[in-house]
Amino acid sequence: MSTDSRGLLIVFSGPSGSGKGTVLSELLAMRDDTVISVSVTTRAPRPGDVEGVHYFFRTHEQVEEMIKNDELLEYASYNGNYYGTPRAAVEQQLNDGKNVILEIEVQGAEKVMAKVPDHVSVFLAVPSMEELERRLRTRGTETEESVCNRMHAAEEELKHIDSYQHVVLNDDVKTAAARINALIEAEKHNHKNGGN
Ligand code: 5GP
């Protein structure tokens, strides 16, 4: 397969509660050439989380073994748990011509930006911190402690917004997905013409 048909690596971040999952589902419905990388995590599954679809749920020891064996493209510790991107699956899908979205937090995202020069990065922003807190509480899956930790993490994440090439506001899910879709189209074109 020629390098031209290699997919785009898309780094996608945003505070927990910013609606990343919903926006990405909407985006995937628009494109059959794009997939989301499935991460490993040590956090407990939430209701509705499916092994191998949303995450690979692993123990601390198992993730540490993967880190030791250099099986992760990046990893980070977030809210007391490990989260990491299995390298082999990402490589395989890019070689198959798929655009691969890494839905990851900022520490991991910055590692990928430094490691993989040819990437596209998008930060999903929320209209306000009040709205973020409201969304986290409405989700109903987080404990009070987890909501507080995630609000604190969001403040930290916002400090890194300038590391991203694109900032997309999630004021409306369909509009946000359409904006990201347009970005992918533009970047694919740029990519083919040898740009970055
Ligand atoms: P959640 O527990 O809400 O599913 O995810 C918490 C945070 O971890 C989110 O910001 C999510 O983007 C991030 N995350 C999920 N998978 C990965 C990963 O493989 N690597 C990194 N660095 N962050 C991840």
Image: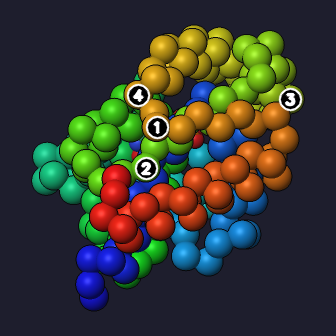
Of circles 1 and 3, which is in front? 1
Looking at the image, tell me whether mark 4 or mark 3 is earlier in sequence order. 3
The reply to whether callout 3 and callout 2 are in contact (CB within 8 Å) is no
Q: In this view, does 2 lie above or below 113?
A: below
Mark 4 residue's CB less than 8 Å from ligand 1: no
Residue at image mark 2: 120
Mark 2 residue's CB less than 8 Å from ligand 1: no
Q: Residue 71 carries which label?
A: none
Few, some or many C-alpha atoms within 10 Å of disc 1 (few <14, some 14-19, many ≥20)? few
Type of amino acid at the residue the image marks with label 4: Ser
As helix, strand or loop, the secondary structure at mark 4 comes to helix
Residue at image mark 1: 165
Looking at the image, tell me whether mark 3 or mark 2 is earlier in sequence order. 2
As helix, strand or loop, the secondary structure at mark 2 comes to strand
Type of amino acid at the residue the image marks with label 1: Gln
Of circles 3 and 2, which is in front? 2
Residue at image mark 4: 163
Q: How far apart are marks 1 and 2 (CA)?
A: 7 Å
Few, some or many C-alpha atoms within 10 Å of disc 4 (few <14, some 14-19, many ≥20)? some
Looking at the image, tell me whether mark 1 or mark 2 is earlier in sequence order. 2
In the displayed structure image, the side of residue 99 where residue 18 appears, left or right: right
Q: How far apart are marks 4 and 3 (CA)?
A: 29 Å
Residue at image mark 3: 138
The reply to whether callout 1 and callout 2 are in contact (CB within 8 Å) is yes
Residue drawn 74% across the image and 55% down it: 178
Q: How far apart are marks 2 and 4 (CA)?
A: 11 Å
